[in-house]
Image (cartoon, rainbow, N blue to C red):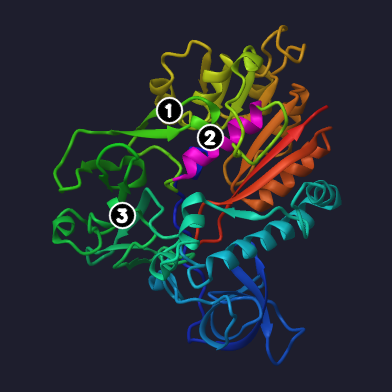
Amino acid sequence: MSPHRRSAPPRPPAPVPATPEYVTLAVGAPAHGGHCIARPVDDPSGRIVFVRHALPGEQVRAVMTEKNAKIWRADAVEILSASPDRVRPVWAEAGPGGVGGGELSHVALPAQRTWKRWVLADCLRRIGGAPVVEAVSALPGAEGGAVPVEPMPGEAAAEADPDPRVRARAGTGTRTRISLAVTESGEAGMHGFRSGTVLPVHELPLAVGAIQDLGLTERALWRKHFRPGMRVDAVAPSAGEPLVLLEDGGRSSRALTVLTATGRATGRRRVAEVVDAAGLGLGELHYSVHATGFWQAHREAPTVLVDRVVRGALAEEPTASGTRPGDGPLDAARMAGARVLELYSGAGLFTLPLVALTGAVRSLEGSGRAVADARRTLHEYAGAELTAGRVTPAAVAQLGRFGTGGPSGGDGADVVVLDPPRQGAGRGIIQAVAALNPRRVVMVACDPAALARDLGAFLGSGYRLAAMSALDMFPHTHHFETIAVLQRD
């Protein structure tokens, strides 16, 4: 995931009716973005309302939150007929009228993954069209036009635990990075959904234990540092103590203060991350990341993504499933000399294992800070050429030409790995990648709509979809990650 996704400015407040307007809705299928498609109970063919905090098949009483010529939105505030998949929300403060970021916490985890699979299938059908649906449907395990959305290992284990208390907490305590804002009264808070208003929060159930133990929402230790409008980030790396980052001032000149877990100022600006790559035969991988830099937020995401993406890129047979029982490490001798182009490479999460296995990776990333992080991590690898700059068709064409001598016999990259920001790579970048004629492309996507568009462009450029997997890396939200492996035979 590219650093471009780390944060976005809050949206301006949505237009809300002057007086509360309530409507009784029959709730239908999920829609991309965490809503369900609903219509008034007394007018089944009436205007579509995108309702949050509901479930397919329910009848709800909802309050309108936005009405304009293009879209109507509402929050379900009373459940008149409940779905069997409804559970007690794990984060009530992200419920109706609350903060964004936990919009599916009222949905049982298996049903959340079904929800996301429906959304994936819908995007592939509506945006990708028939060629994409046919390509996905031909994959093993794909039903209904989409692959299953898989739980992360920790969530799968928690859901199978015999202790009901463990099962009830599944999907919580996973985030190693969280962002807060300070309210006008000096409390820790978060922005309301589609709003510039900061609402106070009193619990952080999705954060890992090391962040929850800081007590950012309740301890006076932190309140004395907070100023209205301040941004507060908590970082809990896989190695070392957590840090609290305070950013104050305007967007163009934010002053950064870094505090230890005990609230003391520190000059520490970097964190160490360790990724288990034993399945690839690489043991532990060590990264150095700036405290404000982008890193995958789910505690297991770096390990799972490295295993799946690198094996997908370099295994003899294309796969998006990662290391399976009985699989051996990747054959380094077979991969030696393979030329890899990596786009939107971030802080080098994939670059390190790719160059360790092949000896030759060229990467391109738009964030200078992320490239500086990657250079610190990869300084011992002469075959890693790290470039800071925008990913453009011209840049892809220039960096992707390695000269003759690679396994494919041409002068272009043998393998391309790309992990674009939420809006996807786009047709121009994909055409530039296809012009290099790599035998394999691995694409990571965090938005199903962008994935559908980009898959359509790759299929139209002579590639076939060889493998795909979807990962529920963001439980209790509508987000998920997809890995697609494309092959040119």
Q: Residue at coordinates 82% horizontally, 48% vertically from top-left?
A: 138
Q: Is residue 305 one of those drawn in magenta?
A: yes
Label number found at residue 285: 1
Whether residue 389 can be seen here? no
Callout 1: SS: strand
Mark 1 crowd level (few <14, some 14–19, many ≥20, 10 Å Cα): some
Looking at the rendered structure, the kind of residue marked 3 is Gly
Instruction: Tell me residue 203's x, y (percent).
Output: 31, 66
Q: Residue at coordinates 49% horizontally, 25% vertically from top-left?
A: 282
| Real-space CA distance between mark 3 and mark 2, rounded to the nearest whole angstrom | 24 Å
| Front-lying residue, 267 or 104 | 104
- In the image, taking residue 29 as reference, residue 154 lies left or right, namely left
Q: Residue at coordinates 50% horizontally, 45% vertically from top-left?
A: 5
Residue named by callout 3: 209
Looking at the rendered structure, the kind of residue marked 1 is Leu
Between discs 3 and 2, the one toward the N terminus: 3
Instruction: Tell me residue 465's x, y (percent).
Output: 77, 39
Between discs 2 and 1, the one toward the N terminus: 1
Stretch of the chain drawn in magenta = 300-314
| Front-lying residue, 437 or 355 | 355
Instruction: Tell me residue 400's x, y (percent).
Output: 67, 19
Between discs 1 and 3, the one toward the N terminus: 3
Residue named by callout 2: 306
Q: Mostly what secondary structure, the magenta segment?
A: helix
